[in-house]
């Protein structure tokens, strides 16, 4: 039995994918690793096949046309056989000793018949330029080391969220929730960390510094220059999120989950405004206007809340140029604290 399926989406990853795969191999026969080559033009597929030949009972390889990060995750979900599913990007890695602790806890829960729908662990920003780290943890927001429900989750604030790097869903949760990520789109990890949540009832937070998120490459999606250019993709992601559940559905969720879902929407709406308003153009104005029009027509209640009851309220009605300056300043403060680059 494979307790965890790890999917590693790869695109031109020859320079760093070995560290990623080697780190997951510390899980031994309890894990499977699905390396998805997403149309790479370098030796990614050659390296992937080397691992599959050396570890035939652990490593699987998918060689497909380029479809983007979400496409790679989708391919992994389809092929996975493990009880749980986790995504590790090819330039990131996991701590081997922490992974062993996680597997031990999974086995304990399986043996007791109490396995949760979602495991939450810490992740670490590893900044390449100065070798510093920033740990994102959740011990102040939820119980540690026990099974609990959403009623035990305290309110999140501002930019603090449970990102993809922190989450390990039961694979069946992803299937039951119909979570399929859009192709050729950046920032789909926000959908992954949102849409499956109403299908999770039993949670477990383990205070393990498991996932290491590599920061510092100029081509990364969180780089300010890149995300300003990719505002249309962020608008696409935000549209997927507001379309996932009506406000009438969110209101019926358990209190802790309802609060967190609303927090996610607020935080991502601010991010969407940042992406879009960081530069001034008629195209950007039209695109943002089209988003609000779509939301108003599809879910008037959610539209009203996001327009008038969210973190974005303060900037929604400011002149475009001033709005952009305020949002960019806020992002730079976040970058300084977290070192997003």
Image (cartoon, helix red, strand yellow):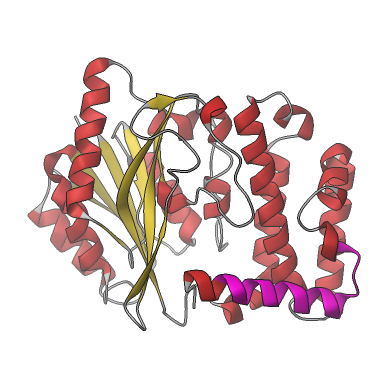
Residue found at x 33% / y 64%: 92
Residue 28 at what x, y percent from top left?
A: 12, 45
Residue most extreme to the top = 113
Residue 117 at what x, y percent from top left?
A: 42, 28
Q: Residue 136 or 100: which is nearer the viewer?
A: 136
Magenta span? 316-334
* Quadrant hosting residue 119: top left
Number of numbered discs overlaid on the protein picture: 0
Residue 97 at what x, y percent from top left?
A: 17, 50
Residue found at x 25% / y 74%: 43
Residue most extreme to the front = 140
Please say if 272 is above or below 71.
Answer: below
Residue found at x 21% / y 19%: 111
Residue 55 at what x, y percent from top left?
A: 11, 51
- Asked if the stretch drawn in magenta spans residue 37, the answer is no
Q: Is residue 2 visible?
A: no
- Asked if the stretch drawn in magenta spans residue 329, the answer is yes
Q: Residue 54 or 119: which is nearer the viewer?
A: 119
Query: Which is the main secondary structure of the residues drawn in magenta?
Result: helix
Q: Residue 214 or 189: which is nearer the viewer?
A: 214
Residue found at x 76% / y 81%: 279
Q: Residue 313 or 51: which is nearer the viewer?
A: 313
């Amino acid at each position: 039995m494979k307790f965890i399926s790890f999917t590693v989406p790869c695109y031109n990853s020859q320079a760093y994918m070995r560290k990623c795969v080697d780190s997951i191999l510390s899980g031994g026969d309890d894990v499977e690793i699905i390396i998805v080559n997403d149309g790479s033009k370098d030796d990614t597929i050659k390296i992937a096949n080397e691992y599959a030949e050396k570890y035939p009972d652990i490593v699987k390889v998918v060689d497909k046309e380029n479809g983007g990060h979400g496409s790679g995750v989708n391919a992994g979900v389809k092929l996975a056989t493990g009880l749980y599913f986790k995504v590790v990007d090819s330039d990131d890695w996991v701590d081997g000793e922490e992974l062993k602790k996680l597997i031990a806890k999974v086995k304990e829960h399986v043996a007791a018949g109490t396995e949760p729908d979602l495991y939450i662990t810490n992740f670490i920003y590893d900044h390449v330029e100065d070798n510093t780290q920033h740990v994102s943890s959740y011990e102040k927001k939820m119980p540690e080391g026990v099974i609990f429900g959403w009623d035990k989750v305290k309110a999140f604030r501002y930019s603090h969220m449970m990102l993809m790097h922190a989450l390990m869903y039961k694979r069946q949760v992803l299937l039951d929730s119909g979570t399929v990520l859009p192709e050729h789109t950046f920032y789909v990890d926000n959908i992954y960390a949102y849409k499956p949540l109403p299908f999770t009832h039993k949670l477990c937070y383990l205070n393990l510094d498991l996932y290491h998120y590599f920061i510092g490459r100029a081509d990364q999606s969180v780089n300010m220059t890149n995300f300003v250019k990719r505002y249309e993709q962020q608008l696409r992601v935000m549209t997927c999120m507001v379309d996932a559940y009506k406000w009438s559905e969110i209101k019926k969720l358990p209190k802790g989950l309802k609060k967190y879902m609303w927090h996610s929407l607020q935080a991502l709406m601010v991010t969407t405004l940042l992406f879009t308003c960081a530069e001034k153009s008629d195209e950007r104005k039209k695109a943002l206007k089209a988003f609000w029009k779509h939301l108003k027509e599809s879910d008037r209640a959610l539209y009203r809340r996001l327009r008038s009851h969210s973190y974005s309220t303060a900037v929604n009605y400011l002149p475009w140029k001033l709005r952009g300056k305020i949002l960019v300043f806020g992002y730079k403060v976040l970058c300084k604290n977290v070192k997003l680059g």
